Structures are given as C-alpha cells and as structure tokens.
Image (cartoon, rainbow, N blue to C red):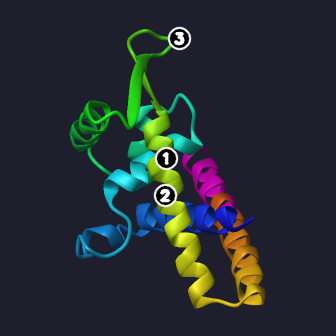
Amino acid sequence: MRRESSSKLVALQILLEGITDSNLNKPKSEGLSIKNKVLFIIENNPNCSPATIIHQLNIAKSNLAIMCKGLIDIGLIDAKRCEEDKRNIVYNITEKGQKEVNELLEDLDHKIVDLFSPREIKALDKKTQEISLLMAKGHNNGSQRNNA
C-alpha cells in the first residue's frame, strides 16, 4: 500500500512538471533527478517509446537519447527494436533498474511516513488520485479540442 503512495506522488510530480515546465527553474539538488524520472516512466510503461518519455518530461529527443544511452551503459534499462516497426526503439527496465526504482520509492515511503499520519497518507492518496484523474480528463479534453 505504501509503495502505491510514493508511486502516485512521483507520477503526479512528473505530470505537473511536464505541464508547468517547473523543472526548468528548480535547482538540480531539489526533487527527483531526470534519471529517476526516466526510470520511473519506463518501469510504468513496458516497451516504452522515446515519444512517451519526451511527452511526459517535456525534454528534447537528443537529451533523452544521451540519458538513455547512459542508463543502458550502466545496465538500468535495455533497448530493443519495436516488433511492429523495426525503425523504432522501445525501452524496458532491467532487474538492476527495477531495484533502483524500488529503493527510490522505499526512500520516499519512509519520508512520507515520517511526515504524515496514516490518516493524512490516506487523504493524500485520495487527493493525488483525484488530481491525476482531473489532469488526465483536462489533457484528453485539450487533445479533443486540438483535433476538432
């Protein structure tokens, strides 16, 4: 249950930063690193396309390519050609990468437990879910307006 709380918070942070570009003004020591965000996205999206990561993090394709090459080199993710279209590549998290994501979420879990009571954690879970649903709904409405 607790991992779910930290996982929702990470997903929400990535979503909010992608929309607001707030990560541009934030010191590097504050918040999640781009590496951790990329790992989290790939973990939650098996056979993850570069476009999925670029869309969620609002980063340049060249920056993503450099980041992913580094993650591949240290064994946190792997890359393979897409089954449907061999021109495209997809990323998957490795066992080592999964371990790193689990450690990150476990560390966040400890921080959450230290900061909040069980009742506050439950309320936080509910609110993050509501915010995520509202933002997804708004994103879908925006996409529909752009297609009209």
For label 2, the residue is 103
Determine the secondary structure under disc 2.
Answer: helix
* Residue 58 visible, this angle: no
Amino acid of disc 3: Glu
Nearer-N-terminus badge (3/1): 3
Going by the image, does 52 lie left or right of 3?
A: left
Magenta segment range? Answer: 137-148
Q: Residues within 10 Å of mark 1 (few under 14, many from 20)?
A: few
Q: CA distance from mark 3 to mark 2?
A: 31 Å
Position above or below: 19 against 83: below
Going by the image, does 57 lie left or right of 43?
A: left
Position above or below: 37 against 20: above
What residue is drawn where x is 22% and y is 44%? 63
Determine the secondary structure under disc 3.
Answer: loop
Q: Nearer the viewer, residue 39 or 23?
A: 39
Going by the image, does 134 lie left or right of 108?
A: right
Nearer-N-terminus badge (3/2): 3
Q: Nearer the viewer, residue 82 or 7?
A: 7
Foreground tag (3 vs 1): 1
For label 3, the residue is 83
141 inside magenta stretch: yes
For label 1, the residue is 99
Percent position (x, y) of residue 100? Answer: 44, 50
